[in-house]
Image (cartoon, rainbow, N blue to C red):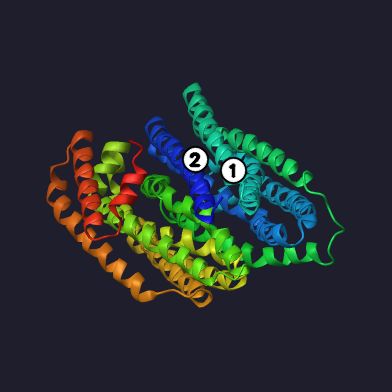
Amino acid sequence: MSLAAKIRSGLEADLLSRLATNLSSGLLVVVLARLLRPDEYGLLYLAISVFSIAAVVGRLGLGKSAARYLTEYEESDAGQIPHVVETAAVALAITLGVATLALAVARGPIAALLGEPGLEPLLLVGAVYVASHGLVNAGRNLCQGFKEIERAAHITLLEALVRPAVAVGLVLAGFGAVGALVGYVVASVLAAALFAVVLYRRSASVERSPLEGGLRRRIVEYAMPITLTENGSAVIKRVDVVLIGAFLTPLAVSYYVVAKQITTVLKSPANSLGFAISPRYGEQLRRGNLETASRLYAEALTGVLAFYVPAAVGLAIVAEPTLTLLFGSEYAGGAIVLQILTVYLVVQAVSYVTSGGLDYLGLARRRAYAKGATAVANLLLNLALIPPIGIAGAALSTAGTYAAYVAANVYLIHRELALDWWAIGRRCAKVAAVTGAMTVAVAPLAPAIGGFVSLFAVVALGAAVWLGATVSVGLVERRQLRSAVPF
């Protein structure tokens, strides 16, 4: 199978899984927003933000570190693969166990610190989620290292189907936010068990050779900068919610969360492309194919910009009616957050096709420095902006600091690859022209949106203008479009 076919196969499987996952998650967000009171809904996601940070600390970047060595030894000494998997498994059992126990013990003081006593039972259930979700993420990383993208996608899809079924069922049964959280736990425990089975079978199928000296130490050492990077990601993605809960109210948290959840649903294509293509940069460089690796990244970068820049502008235009129609008029206060976070959506899309590749190129340490500085800057800006301007301040600090981080990542990958920035710039100019055409068509119609039919009509018009303009300026060729249509 050719390189392009391998990437396409993994991309299609992972994209389908992520689209189904985000559709499921999006529906769950909407249903829970309708079933729970806004303050109860905000409290639920405040709890999720707290223990998501604990989960990142617990897994210590071990999954990504091990995945990097899987891709390396797959070509040079496959007999080391069982040792890599075993090292990651033992280390994860220790670190996640400690994090789970620590959160369970500290749930009371954390709830008191944030001034929300209702957090305590949620954090107790969340302690179990720390372990299971940490294992799920590590399992996905290891499957990525094995290039088992399809199997990882299938397990992720199953988790996405189980989560809303259990969560909504328990909420309807009267268990409230705690019941919703149990749905997350049950789904992640099931997914963790399936990942364990897949990885055990894959590892056991390889004939082991004697352990290479220093291998375990190198896995743990390489996990350290990744840990800093992932902790930085957790701070950037979650600390804003925690600080809104501390400075403001659960109601403000709910406004912020529903806006952020919409951008989360829309990130699927870039996330899948990055998941499928990231290991290939390092693979091609190790084979001496600098030109191929550079072309892969340039096409991925301009591809996500061609999709996400117009999508972000369109979302900003229809932000208020989208929130009102999906979640109810009581959530209209989140419109300003959604408009600001469209910037975050674009830079996050660029990050997905850039940042993961740096880990496979052996640049995790440099990326960690950038992410650590970003996390600190984001924390300080949140502390400075949330008290005077509220949830808009949190959105501004998140979007601004993450944009700076992604720019640093692009610079790092530029130093490793031979990128044609003139060609990339020309394509970006075409993206700007397409975005302008779509904006001219959609912006005058946004005030007339009064229901789902008119919202769908405006979005469909924007999509049609985007597609026509994209083909007209040559960002997408007609033959590529025809090949994507199954009839």
Using the rendered image of the protein, determine whether residue 67 is visible from the camera's viewpoint.
yes
Q: What's the residue type where badge 1 is placed?
A: Ala
Which mark is on residue 24? none
Q: Residue at the spot x=32%, y=58% of the render?
A: 306
Q: Is residue 430 above or below residue 252?
A: below
Which image quadrant for residue 198? top right
Give how far across and how far down residue 55 sits, in percent: 62, 51
Q: Nearer the viewer, residue 29 or 458?
A: 458
Q: Which residue is mark 1?
A: 152
Q: What's the residue type where badge 2 is placed?
A: Ser
Label 1: element kind: helix
- Give neighbour class at mark 2: few <14, some 14-19, many 20+ (Cα, 10 Å): many
Q: Nearer the viewer, residue 432 or 106?
A: 432
Tally the numbered discs.
Answer: 2
Give the residue at the far right of this rendering. Answer: 210
Q: Are marks 1 and 2 in contact (CB under 8 Å)?
A: yes
Decide which of tag 1 and tag 2 comes sooner along the chain: 2
Q: Nearer the viewer, residue 123 or 361?
A: 361
Q: Nearer the viewer, residue 190 or 324?
A: 190
Give how far across and how far down residue 322 sits, in percent: 27, 43
Q: Quadrant of the C terminus?
A: top left
Label 2: element kind: helix
Q: Which residue is mark 2?
A: 17
Which image quadrant for residue 120? top right
Give how far across and how far down residue 332 sits, in percent: 27, 44
Q: Is residue 343 above or below residue 144?
A: below
Judge from the rendering whether residue 294 lies leftward or rightward of residue 308; answer left or right. Answer: right
Judge from the rendering whether residue 303 lies leftward or rightward of residue 70; answer left or right. Answer: left
- Give neighbour class at mark 1: few <14, some 14-19, many 20+ (Cα, 10 Å): many
